[in-house]
Amino acid sequence: HVSPAHSQEGAAQNLQALVDEFEGLIDIIIDGGDVKLGTASSVIDLSCGIPRMIRESVISQDQIHKTLRTKIVLFVCTGNTCRSVMAAALFNSIVQETDAMQALSCGIASENGAGPAYDTVSVLAQKGIQVKQHKTQRISLELIEMADLILTMDQYHKDEVIELAPGAKDKVFLLKEYGHTNGFSPDELKIIKDPIGQGMEVYRQCAEEIEREVARVIETLRKAESSEKEK
């Protein structure tokens, strides 16, 4: 049963209410009867690969997440056009279906809906990865809540995420610090430097650096999952 609505409130729960609200907008309606629970249905968007709760009701975002058991890793940079895009794309190209892991990306100061940097597209295309269709998105509480692990490119990004969602502090790390047994000194070694505007060779070097770190993160997550299953 589906109880759609233009807004979160007053969702249609029977055929007549549905027809009244969406008159002329729906070509075919298959009626399965009234909504038996007497409340609006949960509405989930599956268009971006990872389920997003548009309207939470009987089924919660947490239930969806636990049922699918997919670990969500969120990569964060500044504009969501270079580093985080490369990190998420490389992550998703390395993981296997049995890993039950998937990456998203966003930016601290990005506009929503812009495309990736030209050199980002080019350097990933050389690795057989297509990101032309990527659309930038700004960090949000929804993304932070959805993510099991948040990996940032530098300390500024990490601080901004924690400032926006202090409760997420324990799952926010620099990409180059997560899972490392050896500390870093000096601090700048932890940074994935921004390649924007510096040409293809710098982008290529950045992608190689990110790929090494992402592969290490995946192995760390695999080991943690294996240890959890053994308990």
Image (spheres, grey):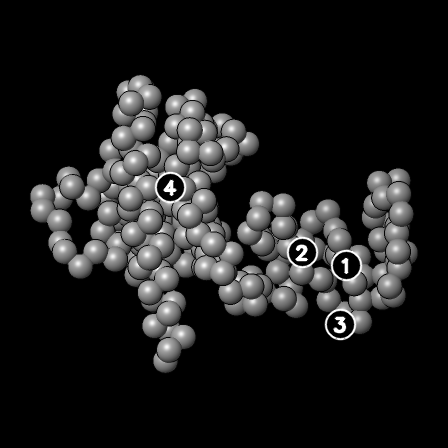
Residue at mark 2: 43
Of marks 3 and 1, the one in the foreground: 1
Mark 1 and 2 residues: CB-CB less than 8 Å, in contact? yes
Instruction: Please state which amino acid type lies under the numbered disc 4.
Output: Ala
- Residue under pointer 4: 87
Q: Where is residue 50 in the image (x, y as percent from the top left)?
A: 55, 51
The residue positioned 29% from the left and 44% from the top of the image is 212
Q: Mark 3 points at which residue?
A: 37
Rendered image: mark on residue 47: none
Q: Is residue 74 above or below residue 191?
A: below
Nearer-N-terminus badge (3/2) = 3
Sequence order check, earlier mark of 4 and 3 = 3
Whole-percent x, y for residue 39 in the image: 73, 66
Which of these two is toward me, 151 or 165? 151
- Is tag 1's residue or tag 2's residue first in the polypeptide sequence? 1
Q: SS at mark 4?
A: helix
Of labels 4 and 2, earlier in sequence is: 2
